[in-house]
Image (tube, rainbow, N blue to C red):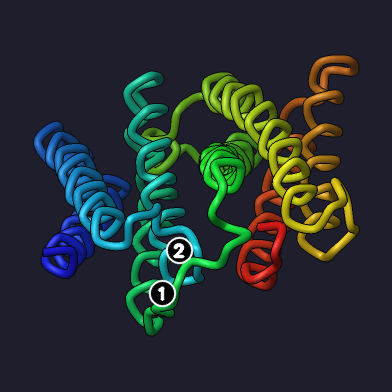
Amino acid sequence: MTHMFFILTVALYGCATAAYLACLVRTSPLLTSWAGRLAVAGFIAHLLSTIHLASRLKYLPLTNMQESLSFFSLAIVGAFIFFERRFKVTTLGSFVVPVALMMLIASSSLHPDVRQLHPVLQTNWFWFHALLAFASYACFTIAAGVAVMYLIQRYFLKTKHFGALFQKLPSLETMDEISYRCLTIGFPLLTVAIISGSIWSEKATGSYWIWDPKQTWSLIIWLIYAALLHGRLTIGWRGKRAAILSILGFIVVLITFLSMKHSITW
């Protein structure tokens, strides 16, 4: 059953990706509507696949790279649906849904690491920490997608290239607002995730902070987004500078996630 839902999810995300990319070429209310429906259907299938797997394992599937890539993909699509419905920006799907699809495909290419759950993971602090971390990373993914859109639109305005893609992208003000909302949601989630991770670390190792690579890079990610939020609130960082820093933050998130997944303080 899990495999069936997983295959269905890949197919739906693939169709949604094709539909969203097609929306960049030609505008059609029907195509736009179907792109959104396919994304929602894929999210539901993905959620059912995750729930079914969790029922089999008796714990949330977040303990190895295959499971985590799939869950990251689920979180991204969930965050996208929220922000797309909130701000009515369909074009965002063209820059975000393909990322979720690639993560899911990468997940399917890995062999499942079936093993007994490690004792240090058998605590509610781990699950609380992991869920908050994924939620914050999903918000930062949306922010990075919006930042790419912002830079493209800014280039069009600067060069006075008012072509078809320019007409499909939202205004700079709208994208800046979405980016800010992603930051104000994602940063507190990351902060609480780091705090709960420290509590989990204390229960697992006897120390709240052991300066292992995962904790160190998590702190670096926190500092990047803290600097971005501080800059926006105090000295009015907006536009190109904020977009570039948002993309940089996401790159660090991705590198940290992919290279240090097996750290105990994940």
Residue 160 in view (yes/no): no
Q: How many marks?
A: 2
x and y percent of residue 210 in the render?
89, 57
**What is the distance, in whole Å, between disc 2 and disc 1 at their CAs?**
7 Å
Give the mark, 2 or 1, whose residue is nearer the N terminus.
Answer: 2
Compared with 208, 168 (above or below) is: above
- Comparing 253 with 134, the one in front is 134
Question: Callout 1: helix, strand or loop?
Answer: helix
Horizontal relation, residue 220 to residue 260: left or right: right
Compared with 7, 171 (above or below) is: above
- Comparing 144 with 100, the one in front is 100
- Comparing 156 with 214, the one in front is 214
Q: Residue at x 52, y 39 (%)?
A: 135
Q: Quadrant of the N terminus?
A: bottom left
x and y percent of residue 164 in the render?
36, 42
Quarter residue 82 falls in: top left
Residue 96 in view (yes/no): yes
Q: Amino acid at mark 1?
A: Ala
Q: Which mark is residue 69?
A: 2
Q: Which mark is residue 106?
A: 1
